[in-house]
Image (spheres, helix red, strand yellow):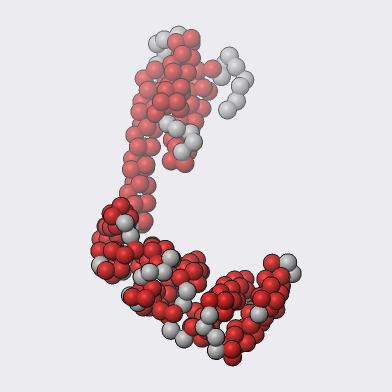
Amino acid sequence: MSTMLDAAAEQMMVHSDFHAAFDTCDRGLQSLSSMNSEDNRCGELKAGFCILGIQALAELNQWTRVLPWILQQYQHPETIPAKIMQMCILLYSKVGEPAAMQEAATVWLHCSSNSSASGFGTVAELHLLHVLVPLGHTDEARELIVGEVGGGAFTEDQRRTALSVVEEKEQQNGEPPPNPDTDSESSAQTEGAVVRKLEAVLTCLYRKVFVTRSGSVPLRRIFVAVVLLYLLFVRVDPALPSSFMWISKLLQVLKQMWRSTFAPQSRVVF
């Protein structure tokens, strides 16, 4: 059996032959079941074959077979070793199907013989964070934390942290989802009003200062530079997408200013 376990590990790790690795694990488990032995060595070999088999099925993208295959080997969820239960919870959580482990993990945690297992607390934590909370089962999560299972699985600090996680999830569930259409429409209306106001102010300034013949050319140049610098570096952030329309409108008005004021003296073109 040890040789078969080593062969399965080599097929997976060295040759990346996941089909062969799983077949070897399956044959090894069948051989172990025919021995009808319950000693520690057989239990370790059985767990080793199951761990490699889970990894092989995951690599083959056949994760839906994992839990049924494990239950075939151990018959009942509460008899599954803690480290294998942890692997199953993490696998089904990673593929976005935490509900598949809810019943099995609940049965395992409420089995009194498992409360003394070395990985009992880890299984409870994974069940809470990767199954109950993502599914929104906050009542069951709270019961797990403050009930008999939580008393044996968590320290006082861990219970407080877990309860805060559950409360945060409850707050998220209680908040109405934002309406993206309403937000975008309101933003567009606000942006359009601001752009129109900017255009009106600049046009008014242009008419009052540049169309009239009062004022010298240097004064007009200084005014253009001040308006440009103020709007671009104080009022408008060019890195924001919402600033593009501002800058476009500003550029149109400045073109008129430039042509009216500097065209006779310069050939620079925007």
Judge by depth and name the residue closer to the eye, 30 or 206: 30
- Residue that appears at 42% across and 75% down: 101
- Residue that appears at 46% across and 86% down: 75
State whether residue 218 is above or below residue 257: above
User: Picture quarter containing residue 34?
Assistant: bottom right
User: Picture quarter containing residue 149?
Assistant: bottom left
Q: Provide residue 210's location: percent of width, then percent of height.
A: 43, 18
Q: Is residue 123 left or right of residue 145?
A: right
Q: Residue furthest front?
A: 39
- Residue that appears at 49% across and 69% down: 83
Q: Provide residue 68's location: percent of width, then percent of height.
A: 50, 83
Judge by depth and name the residue closer to the eye, 250 or 127: 127
Q: Is residue 27 left or right of residue 226?
A: right
Quadrant of the snapshot with the C terminus? top right
Q: Provide residue 26's location: percent of width, then percent of height.
A: 62, 83
* Residue 20 appears in the picture as rendered: yes
Judge by depth and name the residue closer to the eye, 38 or 161: 38
Q: Is residue 60 left or right of residue 143?
A: right
Q: Residue furthest bottom?
A: 34
Q: Provide residue 254's location: percent of width, then percent of height.
A: 48, 26
Quadrant of the snapshot with the N terminus? bottom right
State whether residue 192 is above or below residue 5: above
* Residue 96 appears in the picture as rendered: no
- Residue that appears at 37% across and 66% down: 124
Q: How many marks?
A: 0
State whether residue 77 is above or below residue 246: below
Judge by depth and name the residue closer to the eye, 186 or 56: 56
State whether residue 150 is above or below residue 103: above
Q: Residue furthest right?
A: 15
